[in-house]
Amino acid sequence: GVAGQVKQTPGAIGYAELAYATQNHLATAAIRNAAGEFTAPTIASATAAAAGAASKLPSGTDYRVSIVNAPGKGVYPISSFTWIIVYQKQTDAVKGKKLVDFLRWALADGQGMAASLDYAPLPESMRAGLATRLGTIQIPQ
């Protein structure tokens, strides 16, 4: 992947998610954020970016938003979400229920595992809204 190529190429500059950079022991750069701070990529600075963006979300958002250069202190400016986009109307009851169960787990217990996998947990300010949005998925009876 990209992280492996960057690691093997002297003088290379690349962009990879934090998990790959950490696991491959790649050097990272502190980048100036919207608050004027030079911030390193960390789990905390990625979560701060999500929290900064969450504070600006419109009511009824579907959460397909960019958190690049999000407002706030301690924010890593080139953070991003990994999205899961699903059909609101599921056609298979068994698969639909398993999908919703997994996503509920990911929003709750799964958040506690994120940091150990070098991923940033979602800020609390987003979890309730995402759980509400998840409740709109329709599963056939």
Image (cartoon, grey):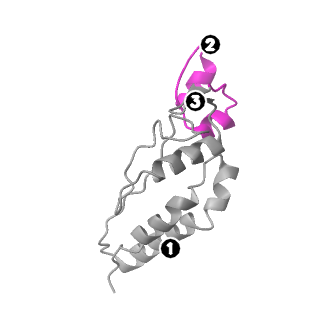
Per the image, the residue denoted by label 3 is: 3
Tag of residue 10 = 2
Q: Distance from label 2 to label 3 (Cα)?
A: 13 Å
Kind of residue indicated by mark 3: Ala
Residue at 50% across / 67% down in the picture? 128
Q: Nearer the viewer, residue 39 or 78?
A: 39
User: Answer yes or no: do the residues labelled 2 and 3 have beta carbons within 8 Å?
Assistant: no
Q: How far across and how far down the image is residue 6, in percent? A: 58, 22
Q: Give the total number of marks visible in the rendering.
A: 3
Q: How far across and how far down the image is residue 17, in percent? A: 55, 37
Q: Is residue 20 magenta?
A: yes
Marked residue nearer the N-terminal end (3 or 1)? 3
Magenta region: 1-29
Q: How far across and how far down the image is residue 57, in percent? A: 40, 54
Q: Secondary structure at mark 3?
A: helix
Q: Nearer the viewer, residue 118 or 123?
A: 123
Kind of residue indicated by mark 1: Asp
User: Answer yes or no: do the residues labelled 1 and 2 have beta carbons within 8 Å?
Assistant: no
Using residue 141 as the reference point, say whether residue 76 is left or right of it: right
Q: Distance from label 3 to label 1 (Cα)?
A: 33 Å
Per the image, the residue denoted by label 1 is: 101
